[in-house]
Image (tube, coloured by chain):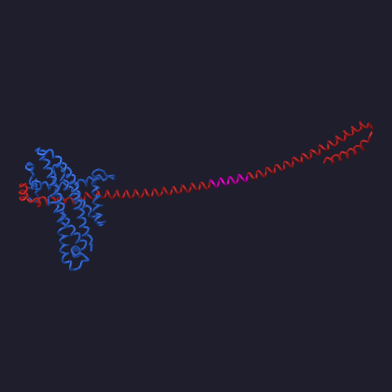
Amino acid sequence: MLSAGINFPPISDVLNWRSIVFGGTPFALNKVGLITLVAAGLTLLLFFVAGHQAKLVPGGVQNFVESIVDFINNSIVYDVMGSEGAPWAPYLTGLFCFILFCNLFEVIPFIQMPATARMSIPAPLALMVWVTFIVVGIRNQGIGHYFKNAVIPSGVPGALLVILIPLEILSNFIVRPFALAVRLFGNLLAGHLLLLTFAVISEAMFVRSIGLVVLPLPFAMLTALTGYEIFVSALQAFIFTILSALYIAEAMKSQH
Amino acid sequence: MTTVFIAAASSNPILPATGEIVWSVLSFLLLLLVLGKWAYPPVKKMMADRAAKIRNDLDAAELARAEAQRTLEEYREQLAQAKREATHILDEARQTAEALRADLLVKAEEDVTILRARNQEALRIERQRVIAELRTEVGSLALELAEKIIDAEVDRAASQTLIDSFISEIGAAQA
């Protein structure tokens, strides 16, 4: 039987990593923790190099970094938040780069692990965004106004409010961060497992010579999916960032 | 496939690990702090400076273009002015020449008239002189001829009067 020759690793082997240092303590650093450090370090390195180059006509790293800054500023900050959003540009740029690089380790050879496929990264990020937009809302509108505006939709008959207020609370304060985290986590976990599946099948067919004839099929799929996952990495980073910007922008100015 | 489920049950792949949370939060907060304070502003400043420079350059180019346009207009105006002046000068010169020509023509005609009158006068005087001379000569000749023909002694003075009246008659008949 064909499947008997294919040995899928246990799922915990491809998601739960042994700690490298500080094992057994809350500071246990494993592969995922290391990836987050590298993602942060890489972002800073790129920005420092770009800032150091500071050429009038940008090229190389400076060009790349400026493209990201331009993209975040134009497609997210000004489109979603308007000119008042300018102070949030560094925060959103950092968020985007951090998620993007954490995601991209999914397709980096020999690492091949998106840090965001562990709930340990999307959840705290979503939580930070959640705290941020609530704090911004309270600071800009006052605690009473903010929560009143956030949970009571205007122009709705009183009888409906009984149903709508719980729904608004649920959607604005519970579903938002949850959806933000789960969307990123789910997409990257699925991508990771998909790549893993096709890699395992290709490997089994090649190494054990059980299906060299059909090897091109899973291998082509693996190649195509690798490209697709690069796209998903960027897309999910963009979605997470633009939704964060949207929540903060909403909190900055009352809609009602 | 059984091993997968056993592994999944022993360690839930969805639940986050404490160490990972700690390091991801630390990394992200560190990133935000350093990025916001030191790494982002130079890049943003560079981009803003470039945008300002480009805007300034465009403004300067626009100014220069306007200036060039203005100068061109000035030159065109000067050229047109020069052309007008040249035409004017030519016209004047043509008029002057025309007037001069007319003057010269009139003067020449006057000169010709005067010259002609003077010549006629000279001619007339010469003619009278010649006529007078001829009259004398013809008289003497006629007298000599008569003397020889009639071979007679004639009173010269009386004959001279006769001859003169005769010639006058001839002259009157000729005129």
Image coords of residue B99 (percent x, y): 62, 46
Residue at 18% x, 48% y: name it.
A232
Q: Is residue A164 left or right of residue B103?
A: left
Residue B22 visible: no
Q: Is residue B89 magenta?
A: yes
> Residue at coordinates 88% horizontally, 39% vertically from top-left?
B166
> Percent from the top left, x then y, of residue B161?
90, 39
For the point 72% across and 43% down, the residue is B114
Q: Main secondary structure of the magenta part?
A: helix
Left or right: B169 with respect to A197? right
Q: Nearer the viewer, residue A16 or B39?
A: A16
User: In the rendering, at what x and y percent does residue A156 appear?
Assistant: 21, 66
The span shown in magenta is: B86-100
Residue found farthest to the bottom: A158
Would you say residue B124 is visible in this rendering?
A: yes
Instruction: Give the left or right position of residue B57, taking residue A131 as reference.
Output: right
Q: Quadrant of residue A213?
A: top left
Q: Which chain is blue?
A: A
Q: Colour of chain B?
A: red
Q: How many marks?
A: 0
**Residue at 20 percent of width and 60 percent of height:** A137
Question: x and y percent of residue B12 in the render?
Answer: 7, 51
Vertical order, B123 against A160 (above or below): above
Give A87 or A11, whichever is nearer the viewer: A11
Q: Quadrant of the C terminus of chain B?
A: top right
